[in-house]
Image: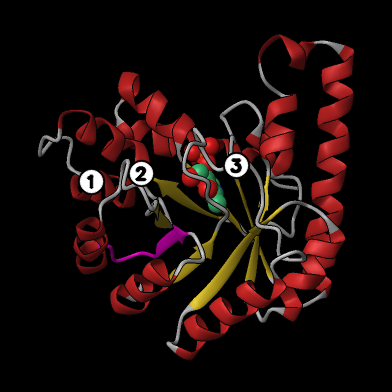
Amino acid sequence: MTPRLNINIDHVATVRQARRAPEPSVLAAAMLCEQAGADGITVHLRGDRRHIQTEDLYTLKRAVTTYLNVEMATTDEMLRIALDVRPDAVTLVPETPHEVTTEGGLDVVANSDLVRRSVESLREGGQFVSLFVDPDARQIEASREAGADQIELCTAAYAEATLGARAVRAEGQRRAEEELRRLRQAATLATQQGLHVAAGHGLTYRNVGALASVAEIAEYNIGHNVIAHAIFTGLADAVREMRRRITEGQP
Ligand code: PXP
């Protein structure tokens, strides 16, 4: 089955917040992504509100007709908002105040009590819960024990290995292949454990095709590279092109 593609539109809000202006509209971006064939919209409500604002979630919830996935930290404030907005999925991610972007997966093993309580409270509220984790067997088993419905595999290390000059050197290629193997093994394990499998972070038009050969990955969450491309091509073409790359990479 063709995997789902959710477009992360955080960076439309980044441009808006740079001027605290009404434009560009996050709502218009979501509608364009859907019209161009995206299967869903993903946004990350950060504690510091550097891009998406709480109000955006309510606006998107009213307008998005495909699928709305909200990423957030495991804080009381965020859980309260999630249970009020009620998106289609909540993805729990780690968050530190000064990071440029999410730096890796949630350490479900080290924070098992907090994660379990957060998952429980979201699931009691009827939410589908995904945990963003590194491709590591212990994290996947801990995610299942915490009661998650899905894991989203952090593809940052794979993406890093495919970047720029590093990617063309033999060492970079070896690392990318190794990371791809880890992701494949993790996706297989998660499926065996009864978890749905998503993937995301740092994925680009260049590196998504190889990853799309992992049949267990049923959902991609891709943001920065699509929005960067959209500056030159427009959002609809940028979404369609990412969809094409994923389809071409299918096993
Ligand atoms: N998935 C998760 C859990 C994320 O935190 C992010 C970044 O917000 C993404 C996917 C999208 O990453 P990128 O913008 O690098 O495509």
- Residue 152: horizontal and vertical position, in percent? 63, 58
Label 2 packing within 10 angstroms: few (<14), some (14-19), many (20+): many
Name the residue that disc number 2 marks. Answer: 9
Name the residue that disc number 3 marks. Answer: 246
First reached walking from the N terminus: tag 2 or tag 1:
2
Q: Is residue 67 magenta?
A: yes
- Write the residue at 64% across / 79% down: 116
Label 3 packing within 10 angstroms: few (<14), some (14-19), many (20+): many
- Residue 15: horizontal and vertical position, in percent? 26, 30
Q: Is residue 83 magenta?
A: no
Q: Which mark is residue 26?
A: 1
Amino acid at pointer 2: Ile
Residue in the foreground of this view, choosing between 214 and 157:
157
Residue in the foreground of this view, choosing between 101 and 25:
101
- Write the residue at 64% across / 36% down: 208
Query: In front: mark 1 or mark 3?
Result: 1
Q: Secondary structure at mark 1?
A: helix
**Separation of disc 1 and disc 3 at Cα?**
24 Å
First reached walking from the N terminus: tag 2 or tag 3:
2
Query: In front: mark 2 or mark 3?
Result: 2
Which residues make up the magenta segment? 64-72
